[in-house]
Amino acid sequence: MREDHLAPAVDALLDDVVGSGQEVGAQVAVIRNGHTLVDTARGVSDPRTGAPVDRDTLFWAGSTAKGIASSVAHVLIERGEVTDDLRVVDVWPEFGARGKEAVTLRHVLLHTAGVPGLPAETTAADLCDWDTMCAVIADAELWWEPGTRLGYHAKTFGFLLGEILRRATGDPISTLLRERLTGPLDVADQVHFGVPAQLLPRVATQVAADGDEVLRPEPGSPLDRAMPAGVVPDADYANRSDLLTCDIPSEGTMSALGAARIYSALLGHVDGVEPVSPARRAAMATVAFAGMDEVMGFPTSWGYGYSPARPSGRGTPGSAFGMVGVNGSAAYADIDSGVAVAVMRNRFTGDFATIERIDRLIEDELS
């Protein structure tokens, strides 16, 4: 198929899902080999006012931001500012408490560090206190010997990674994101961990799904211990201005085009910006772990800081890298096809049907 077929096909799909009520508002961006093929938006950003989604609307994107955070780390590794096997205690000595001396940056990026847990009483407001959260994590006990098992570090990932990079460079991860990625790519106002207060009016309101479709961990389960009831995300959580404006790098807020442009740069397709080498790019997409997720409780595979698969499961193994968010957002890249994709939405549900349909459509139209 020709590339010029893709944009009208995506528009038709968005008309369908918004018109049917499956989606409230959505953005899609597709960049192939540096050329923007799709940059479109549909629906409303706030049902109370009827304000439309446009290309500048920002969306809370949940764990899609973990892929952005991992990308910051890979850029710093590429530049020699940190190393893959940097021991956390070498830059963050307090973290060595309770036998955690062997944890490395590699373990953190792979979710094999063994530090996914948070105290049961942790609240959403607590997540806004960076120093307190880092102190809690530094004092945490290991769930397993680092590197021997994998378990999704749902909330601790961002604080672990952010504090390691802050201790190593002297800059918070939001500054590193802006200086190393979003600034050079001219998307500094489009991709954030903490949204600047002046940009809050651009953030779409997340709308609760009908019924209880959001992940609710079973009390006492490993996931409940990693993501206690007070920090389980839902629409109300995602709309809190305190959470939106704080750096919580396990989650973030962004536009589809901003996220897609970062992944296009990681593919080496943005002139004048080369964040990573081809060798590191290949490592980012390689499946580094396959087995049981000790937190989520099901078999999984992980790349080096990313999910190593496209949302629909299509594509060549070892070619894709990116992340999806709990509310059905996604941003990812595919080395073989040269495609960088991001999908944002404000219907808060764990149903990933829309991003899967869009990914299949992209594969069909561009193959």
Image: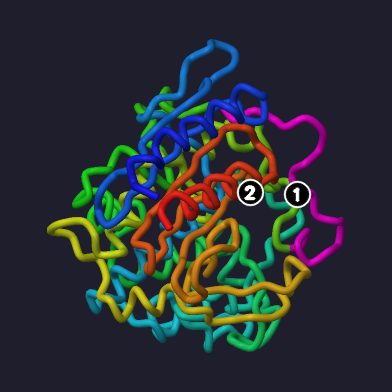
Q: Is residue 218 magenta?
A: yes
For the residue labelled by badge 2, is the local secondary structure a helix, a strand or a loop?
Answer: loop
Q: Main secondary structure of the magenta part?
A: loop
**The quadrant where residue 80 appears:** bottom left
Q: Position of residue 203 (x, y in %)?
A: 46, 29
Q: Where is residue 108 in the image (x, y as percent from the top left)?
A: 51, 74
Whole-angstrom CA distance, mark 2 to mark 1, is 8 Å
The front one of 314 and 114 is 314
Which residue is the site of mark 1? 215
Marks 2 and 1, the one that precedes in the sequence: 1
Question: What colour scheme was applied to this rendering of the protein?
Answer: rainbow
**The quadrant where residue 88 appears:** bottom left
Q: In this view, does 38 lie above or below 66?
A: above
Is residue 126 rendered to the left or right of residue 341? right
For the residue labelled by badge 1, is the local secondary structure a helix, a strand or a loop?
Answer: loop
Q: Is residue 195 magenta?
A: no
Which residue is the site of mark 2? 326
The front one of 42 and 32 is 32
Which residue sits at x=45%, y=78%?
105
At label 1, the amino acid type is: Leu
Q: Are the residues tagged 2 and 1 within 8 Å (C-beta)?
A: yes
Magenta range: 205-225
At label 2, the amino acid type is: Val
